[in-house]
Every structure is written in C-alpha cells, then in structure tokens.
Image (cartoon, coloured by chain):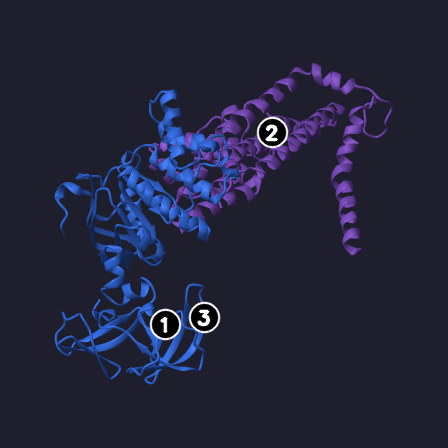
Amino acid sequence: MFKKISRNLFLTMMFIFLYFPIFYLIIYSFNSGDTMVSFDGFSLKWYRELLHNKDILIIILNTVIVALISALIASIIGTLGAIAIYQTKNKQKQNILYSLNSVLIISPDVIIGISFLLLFTVFAIPFGFMSVCLAHIAFSIPVVVIMILPKLNQLNGNIIYAAKDLGASEYQVFSRILLPLIKPGLIIGFFTAFTYSLDDFAVTFFVTGNGFTTLAVNIYSSARIGISLEINALSTIIFVITFVMAILYYIFEIRGGKSKYVKNN
Amino acid sequence: MKWGKMNIKIELKNIFLSYDHTVIFEDFSMQLDDNKFYTLLGPSGCGKTTILNLIAGFIKPDAGQILIDGIDVTNIEPNKRLVNTVFQDYALFPHLNVYDNVAFSLSLQKISKIEKKKRVMDALNFVNLGEYIYRDIAELSGGQKQRVAIARAIINQPKVLLLDEPLSALDLKLRTEMQYELKKLQKELAITFVFVTHDQEEALGMSDYIYVLNNGQVMQKGNPIDIYDEPKNRFVADFIGESNIISAKYLGDYQVKINNDIYKCVDGNFNQGTLVDVVIRPEDLKIVTHKTKLKVQIITRLFKGMHYEIVGQDISGEKWLIHSIKNVMPGEEVFLDFDPEDIHLMSTNV
C-alpha cells in the first residue's frame, strides 16, 4: 500500500516538475499571440517563422553535423578504447583505466568545458567548428566505451584465442569476431554520443566562438535577449526528436538485451 | 627414451615461465611423439593448461624453446602454428552458425566455395553432425557444441590437436561416450593429440602416454598401466586411482616391514633398511576367513554399485581402504590378505 502511494507520488512529482514546464512551453509554441502569458488561439505562426529563419536553419544544420561527426569519431575511438581496456591483462591497470573512463562521464560539464577552453587556448586551436567538434568527440568517447565494455565482458574469454588459433590475424579477430559481437553496444553508444552532442550546452558554451554556434547555445543567448515564441517552436521540435531517439534507444537496448551472444554455458 | 629423432612432433626445451612473480615452470622439458594420444594429468594449478597454451602460442615462455616438427616456433604467433585447440568451454563463435564456425579457418584462406563446403561437410560428418549445419550455436546441446568445436579444430588438418579438458562440461554418460570417440578420432586422423585433464579415469582410458604433473614438474610419465601399477611416488599413487599408502621399511631380500609385520614383496631396488612408501590398491585387498597378519575392524561401508567401498582400521590405528563385493557390517572384525605382487614400494623422496 505504502509502496503504491509512494510510487504514485513519485510519478506525480516527476510529471509536475519535469514535464509540466515542457508541456507548457510546447502549448505556447502554438500560440497565435506573442507572449507566454495568455493563449490567444491556435496557430503554426512560430513554426512558419522558424522555417524562414535562415540563421536558425544553419545553426540546426551545424548542430546536426557536429553531432554526427563527433558521434562517428567517438564511436571509432571508443570501440578501440573499450577493446584496449578489455584486453588489459593486469586487473589493477584495467580497473584504473575503467575508473578513469567513468570519472569523465560523471564529472560536471562546466569543469570539462573550462578545461577544454584552457587546452584549446594553450594549443592555439581556433574556437569554432573545429574546437566544438574536438570537445564533443572527447566527452563522447567515455560514453561509447561504457556502452561497449559490457558486451565484451559478456564474451567467452577464449573466443579471441580460438580465432587466433584458427589462423586469424589481429585485424581479422577484430573484424570477424569482435566487431559483430559488440555491434549492439556500438549502435547504442553511437546514439547516446549523438544525443549528448546534440543537446550539449555547457561544454559548447565554453569552446565555441567566431560566430559558430549550436542550437543549445543559440537558444540560451536568444532567451537572454527576450523570449520569442519561435524558441518554443524550436524547443518543441527538439523535444519531439529527443523523444523519438529515446524510444529508438530503448528498442535497440531491448534487442541488445535479448542478444544470444552470451557465454556458451 | 626409445624415440628416434624423426618421430618427435613437439619438443619443449628448458622452458622457464613466471606469471605475477610466481614461477610456473623452471627448466621444464618434454618431448611428444608423432601420432600418439598424450594426456597431461594433474590437479588444477599444476601447469597442464599452461603447457597447451605454450604449444598453441597463446603464452610465450620467458626462456626456453618450443619446437614443432623440429622447427623453432617459440616466437611464432598462434595463427601461424599448425596446431589447433579444442577449448574447455568450446569457445564457439556465438554470432556464426554451425557451418560458419567450422568454416572459419577456411574463410580466412583463399579457398573456393565448393571446396570449402566439401571440407566443412566432411568435418561435420566426421563428428556425426552432418544434419546440423545451419543451426545456431545457441540451439545446440553441450555434446553437440563439443563436436562442432572438434570439427572446427580439425578442418585445417593440424599436425597436433590440443584438447583442454574438453569433456569436463559434459554429463557422465556423454563423457564416457566421447572418450571412445576421441580415441577413435585420434586413430583415424593419425596425428598427435595432447589432452589435458584432471580426471584420472579419462587419462587412463584414452591415453597412449600420460604425463602426471604437479607444481610445474613431471611427477611421472609412462603408459597408463605402468603409471597405475607402479606409481613412482606418493603423489602419483594418491592422484591416480585410490590407494592405501603406508610408510614402511625395506628389510632387504624382498622383505618389507609394514606396521611391525614382515611381508614378502617383489620390488627389490632399495638398500637394506631404507624407509619406503608402500602402495596397496583397495581392489587388491581381499577379505578372507582364515587368520592373517592383518586384522581390521570395519568402520564404514559404502555401496558403490560394482563393489562396496569399505574402510577398516587395524590395531595400530592405520586405516585401510578396501574394495570388495563381500558385504561386511561396520563393527565387524575381519582379516585382510594380499599377494606379494600387490605390494608396490616407492621411494619416499620426491
């Protein structure tokens, strides 16, 4: 009984605190008026305006390109990193590497952002597309690693030996055995890295410059100037996309969880 | 050793290996002949699997040489060695079906599809799995996985097949069945098998030659009958089969003093007065009705199907393990008898 009440309470609270503001924002994106104070009637005016706003469209494009590139490169590096951690024979060394990887995931974005700012300044890397891409790749790698490692740990340890024993070179072991077996983790890792990049504000805020901006940073700056309901429309679109991605993620994860690629016995 | 140089298939020369500051092998050497069924037998941690890994190339020795067919392969990668392994847990590729698992090594080479299919079918028919080619690995039983693992390992016609406790995951009936099949397989392929196990029954049943290992050292090597009948030391006698091991004294002239009684024996390669260990197998102890030197009181009796496993205690407190078909009750006092040839004397050294 108590369990039921507390669960319902939790759901209600979550709904009020998290979803209510979002729904409020979404509802007003369809407002024909100019403010979030009164709903004057249903209209797609803000969406239309958004579509004609070339600046915004370019920023959206930038954001997606950065997300795709950083997720792709992070997936490649993350895969190699996960395999390297998996194949580290010294258990203590392996634990240290794993912990260092996990620390990066839980450390605050602001700190990561500042450290990149310092790094790029020291190495005179121009702020803009390049710096944002580098930063996003860097903070996405640990996420990919953490998605792939469990898949590797699930494998029968002798599988790699067996492949070598049967004549496979290091590359063939990777391409024919490891890659197919970690694919579910890799796909989830890619999607997670993609969404991380897509909605990152804190890190991007520190390392962007020279007129290059992403959606999250742009929304922040325009919100400071004064709320236009165009932002509501944009936020609504992002929310819907994120929602769809989340559903895709779970579909993949459920499929990955049912994977038959587990230990033989 | 009677082996001619030409027949030596695998040679481990003065291997030194340590891992995490623990010495596993110190100056370990062994020679394996062509076309023989070898078993490396020993408790876990004795180094038997490590020897397989050294031959396969998964582990490199710190010092020493490994030769296959007289060629030094010490620094050759596993994928370039003409040996194949059947792993304890099979290590089949879960994302490939039976056909692709078996075909794996062929798919790495330039071999026509027709040739490949023929060889895969041959290998699968060899292990009686011809009907299962397109099954998923997850759909197979333990015994079937075992056969796939064997087919996968023999398809490339290796010169040596290494088997790392391949039967340990199977149930008793299947294990016995597979023992016969492996023995047959070795005869048909006419290559060297190196079989690793901790199960002395498997070792005695299948091998041409057994290496009994402990702590990275060869305790005894020889054919199964010699090892069973003439264990060299306490460890081997204890590990192979069940036995009564008693401290005794060799009096010279084929006489041995066990618990203050003097018995005749057939072993005589000891100096007079040497302390020895005596082995008497439980099946050699006979419960008799006439009076003998050895009287015991029955402590426990366990029905084992084929026989009773009986433990008796003599006046000096020594316990005797007896296998007998005679049904005696705990508490009963009986006499035990054995023949001079049933007494095996071992040096107490080693």
Identify whether A24 is placed above or below B327.
above
Among the chains pictured, the one given blue colouring is B
User: Looking at the figure, which quarter contains the N terminus of chain A?
Assistant: bottom right
Q: Look at the numbered disc 1 and give the secondary structure of its residue.
A: strand
Q: Check residue B302 in the rendering and tell me which mark sits there, or answer none.
A: 3
| Cα gap from disc 1 to disc 2, whole angstroms | 77 Å
Mark 3 or 2: the one toward you: 3
> Where residue B163 sits: x, y (%)?
34, 45
Residue density around tag 2, few if under 14, some if 14–19, many if 20 or more, within 10 Å? many
Tag 3: amino acid: Leu
Residue A176 vs residue B114, the one in the foreground: B114
The span from disc 3 to disc 2 (Cα, nearest Å) is 72 Å
Instruction: Output the chain of dot 2.
Output: A
Element class at badge 3 = strand
Report crowding for label 3: few under 14, some 14 to 19, many 20 or more residues within 10 A (C-alpha): few
* Same chain check for tags 3 and 2: no
Which residue is more in the foreground, A62 or A79?
A: A79
Tell me the residue at 41%/79% (across/down).
B298
| In the image, farthest residue toward the front | B290
Q: Position of residue A189 (x, y in %)?
A: 54, 34
Residue at image point 76% right, 25% down: A229
The picture quadrant where one finds residue B78 is top left
The reply to whether residue B319 is visible in this rendering is yes
**Residue B322 badge:** 1
| Amino acid found under the numbered disc labelled 1 | Ile
* Residue B57 shows in the view: no
CA gap, disc 3 and disc 1: 11 Å
Q: Nearer the viewer, residue B213 or A3?
A: B213
Amino acid type for the residue under numbered disc 2: Leu
Q: Residue at x 30, y 33 (%)?
A: B157
- According to the rendering, which colour does chain A have? purple
> Mark 1 belongs to which subunit?
B
